[in-house]
Image (cartoon, rainbow, N blue to C red):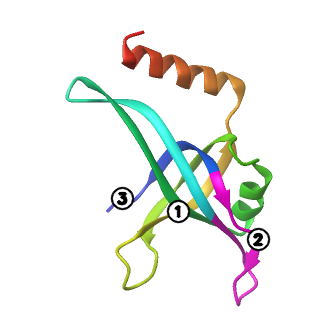
Amino acid sequence: MSNLVSLNAVWIERDALRYTPAGVPMVSGKLQHQSAQTEAGQPRETGFEITAVAAAEQADAALAIPLNQACRVTGFLNRKSRNSRTLVLHITHIELLGESELKTEQMTKQKLEGN
């Protein structure tokens, strides 16, 4: 089974760097995503916030991205804890979006909105 998530988002909240008992650096916070998608041939606005965690090198990369700056994250979803139904995005790759990627994203959104 596949469990792969890739989205463009902005960090809207981010906790301080912490370490697991094994010494692995971790950072968590909230990501916000907004986009225009097509569903059944119709444009649809999407938007949500999701809790995300990044470990090891990805924790350092996440801390290097300023709050409210667009980034692309890739990872997988898992429960917050064994008995929880709340989902958390575990980041396996994160990168800052460049100007050309932001323009492409804006043009796609405008096209879907019919502007």
**Viewer-side residue, 11 vs 99:** 11
| Residue at numbered disc 3 | 2
Eyeballing the image, is 101 above or below 68? above
Eyeballing the image, is 70 above or below 31? above
Q: Please give the name of the residue rendered at 75% of the width and 48% of the height, measured from the top-left corner.
A: 65
Q: Position of residue 27 (x, y in %)?
A: 69, 68
| Residue at numbered disc 2 | 17
| Location of the C terminus (image quadrant) | top left
**Disc 1, disc 2: CB below 8 Å?**
no
Question: Is residue 17 inside the magenta stretch?
Answer: yes
Secondary element at image label 1: strand
Query: What number of labels is visible?
Result: 3
Which residues make up the magenta segment?
12-28
Secondary element at image label 3: loop
Most distant residue in the left direction? 40
**For residue 38, what is the image quadrant?**
top left
Disc 2 crowd rating (10 Å Cα; few below 14, some 14-19, many 20+) is some
| Residue at numbered disc 1 | 51
Distance from disc 1 to disc 2, alpha carbons, whole Å, reads: 15 Å
Of label 1 and label 2, which has the lower sequence position?
2
The kind of residue on which mark 2 rests is Leu
Q: Please give the name of the residue rendered at 57% of the width and 52% of the height, measured from the top-left corner.
A: 31
Of label 3 and label 1, which has the lower sequence position?
3
**For residue 24, what is the image quadrant?**
bottom right
**Disc 3, disc 2: CB below 8 Å?**
no
**For residue 3, what is the image quadrant?**
bottom left
Question: Is residue 41 inside the magenta stretch?
Answer: no
Indicate left or right for 25 with 107 as reference. right
